[in-house]
Amino acid sequence: MNSPNVFFLEVIEWFDETGKELVHRIPETGSGDIKFGAQLTVRESQAAVFFYQGRAVAAFGPGRHTLKTLNIPILTKILSSPWGMTSPLRAEVYFVNLKTFTNLKWGTRDPVAFKDAILGLVRLRAFGMFNLQVVKPGLFINTLVGTQGMFTAGEIEDYLNQVVVSRLNDYLGETLDSLLNLPARYDEMSVALSERLKNDFERFGMSLDQLFINAITPPAEVQQAIDDRSRMGAIQDMNRLMQMKTAMAIEKAAENEGGAGAGLGTGMGLMMPGVMAPYIAAGMTHPEAASSSGGICPKCRSAVPADAKFCPQCGSPLQCLVSCHQCGKPLMAGDKFCPACGCSAFESASQP
């Protein structure tokens, strides 16, 4: 009577209903008695590896194969058995899925430290995806699958994730200076990282078809600092733009003086104090403006004509009697104290 773990196989084939299996063994448990002349069907996206006594003895590509001594030399050994050409062969067949498995995820579980040339020491999180394909079925089975009846992409995804993150850490430390330069380098980094991972995948009979970096992100507080830096740059550029447009509008209004530009000139005149305030505060006014109008009233600082004796704005006399002996500022007729330093004007007037 046959053991419950022994199966007699005449037709051998496999369909991946889940779309996630990398390797499927027939039978999944125990061993199977494969009859001489059994039919093995391999699809275009598959490869079949025939194992006998724990060793891979034959590999089959796409098509329908009849298991005879012609394509499996090991079958000749059963000819001396009492069953002759009808004797079954106890063995297993491993079907390997050769399709490209896409959208496998990778990412950092914990933030990794990175020394940024501008921001200092920051902790980064990174994530992305990669595509995987088995290119050497025998090597893949012997190094990763072993005797498992079924092996899925999810079982190897975690290991490969750690490999990708490790190589990424090395690459960032060797080539990147600052996070501010990251967005323009994702494609370049993906290609370079794929090249570094090539040997790690090939040693297991796999190929890294493509690798993508979706994002490399610093902590929230570092992101806020980067955003603040960008806003400051935008505000400065906006101020310069507004000042340039104001100056152009004033020039255009002057050209159109007497027509519709007169109203515009009045409006721009109201805007000028606010626009020119930064320059006035920084001491950027032109001294030539005062000299061309004749002078400046020492009381109210208004411009006065060259031949004026009184200020047209405050009415103060413009004839200077003497300079303050403390600060050197001019004293006008009727002044009892220096308006600049507060010393007695009489003492100033008495100075030779």
Image (cartoon, grey):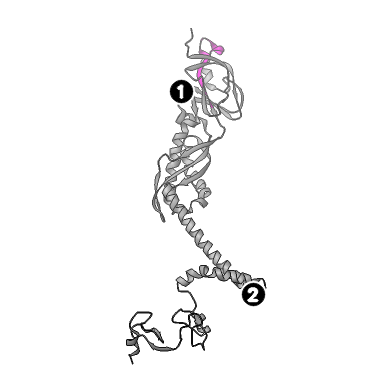
Residue 333, horizontal then vertical, whole percent: 41, 87
Q: What amino acid is found at the position of numbered circle 1 in the picture?
A: Gly
Quarter occupied by the C terminus: bottom left
Q: Residues within 10 Å of mark 2 (few under 14, many from 20)?
A: few
Displayed quadrant of residue 270: bottom right
Residue 159 in view in this figure: yes
Secondary structure beneath label 1: loop
Q: Earlier in the sequence, mark 1 or mark 2?
A: 1
Residue 187, horizontal then vertical, whole percent: 53, 48
Give whichever of 36, 64 is nearer the camera: 64
Task: Return the residue found at the far right.
Answer: 259
Task: Return the residue found at the far top.
Answer: 1
Q: Residue at x 45, y 50 (%)?
A: 223
Residue 61, horizontal then vertical, whole percent: 58, 28
Is 46 included in the stretch rendered in magenta?
no
Give whichever of 163, 219 is nearer the camera: 219
Secondary structure beneath label 2: helix
Residue under numbered circle 2: 255
The answer for how far apart the CA atoms under marks 1 and 2 are is 97 Å
Residue 248 in view in this figure: no
Vertical placement of residue 108 versus 307, above or below = above
Vertical placement of residue 5 versus 305, above or below = above
Q: What amino acid is found at the position of numbered circle 2 in the picture?
A: Glu
Q: Nearer the viewer, mark 1 or mark 2?
A: 2
Vertical placement of residue 339 versus 351, above or below = above
Q: Residues within 10 Å of mark 1 (few under 14, many from 20)?
A: few
Magenta stretch in the rendered image: 79-95
Residue under numbered circle 1: 54
